[in-house]
Image: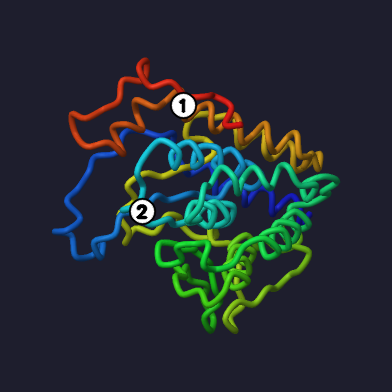
Amino acid sequence: MLRIIGLFYIFMCCSTFTPHKPIVRVNINNQKQFNNTKFITITPGGIAGFYSLGVCNFIKEHYDVSDYSFLGASAGAWNAMVCSYNGDTQSLVKSLFDNDIIDDTNSINELQYKLKHHILERYSIDDFDVERLHITICEVDQFSIKSKVINNFYNLETILDCCMVSSHIPYITSNKLIKVYDNKITFDGGFFSFPPKDKYHHIIISPNMYDPDMLGNMLMNMFKRNITKDSLYELFVQGYTDASLHKEDLDEVFLPENNYINIEDNEFDIIPW
């Protein structure tokens, strides 16, 4: 019963996100409530987060995102961390699939621990632009639960632990009822309405931004425990491919006005490697 409730919760969290539409820019320099920060925001999505990762990879390859910060919750938190990588994002993602860490994974909880171990072995906090990384969690504060954006990270393990508590749905994406972060009981960052309304979200990346069936397929795979390297790579490639097919929309979001790249004149590989 707990598993069914948890899967229903994932669906409800993710189904609130509408397909991508071109976003109207605002002059955030004149909007004090946005603190002059524009976000590439990445929603929850369970294992369909690998689809969002493909979209993120395409965006980082084809656009200058140095002026943007990254905000994510749950699976989106992991993707936001990858987006904040200072090096070639493609090489980081490639290392995940080249390695055997995803093989023989029976649960999202196990997958997260394997990802954490892999990243800690190969990278340090200096490899990530932590000032641009923001992760949403939900924490228990006395007798209420509130959403909170975390931006102060002391080391790489702190970032990874924050990604894990941001993905914490008891006995669904975790094998525990309670997880603690910064001395507070913490749950999945998508528990309340996400993304937060006090931020300027220049673009919102979600698993159903281009494919309305993605969430249903993800839930079915979770029921079947179909978490294999091939299935996750297929999600990644689909996200990358769909982003490439919607490049004209992305040009409207990331390129200066009247300075769009003609997609027919800008060749690129559909499969990233």
Q: Which mark is residue 59?
A: none
Lower position in the chain sequence, tag 2 or tag 1: 2
Q: Quadrant of residue 35?
A: bottom left
Measured from the top left, where is residue 222 in percent x and y? 75, 43
Q: Which residue type carries mark 2?
A: Phe
Q: Is residue 260 left or right of residue 18?
A: left
Report the mark closest to the observer, 2 or 1: 1
Q: Is residue 17 left or right of residue 53?
A: left
Measured from the top left, where is residue 115 in percent x and y? 70, 56
Secondary structure beneath disc 2? strand
Measured from the top left, where is residue 81 in percent x and y? 53, 57
Query: Would you name the residue on which mark 1 appears?
Result: 244
Q: What color scheme is it?
A: rainbow
Q: Is residue 110 visible to the viewer in this orientation of the structure?
A: yes
254 or 129: nearer the eye? 129
Query: Would you name the residue on which mark 2 appears?
Result: 39
177 or 130: nearer the eye? 130
Q: Residue furthest top?
A: 264
Q: Quadrant of residue 251?
A: top left
Q: Give yes or no for contact between labels 2 and 1 (Cβ–Cβ under 8 Å).
A: no
Q: Is residue 172 visible to the viewer in this orientation of the structure?
A: no
Tell me if mark 1 has few (under 14), some (14-19) or many (20+) residues whose alpha carbon lies within 10 angstroms of its own: many
In this rendering, the answer to whether 154 lies above or below 76 is: below
Q: Which residue type carries mark 1?
A: Ser
Q: Quadrant of residue 22?
A: top left
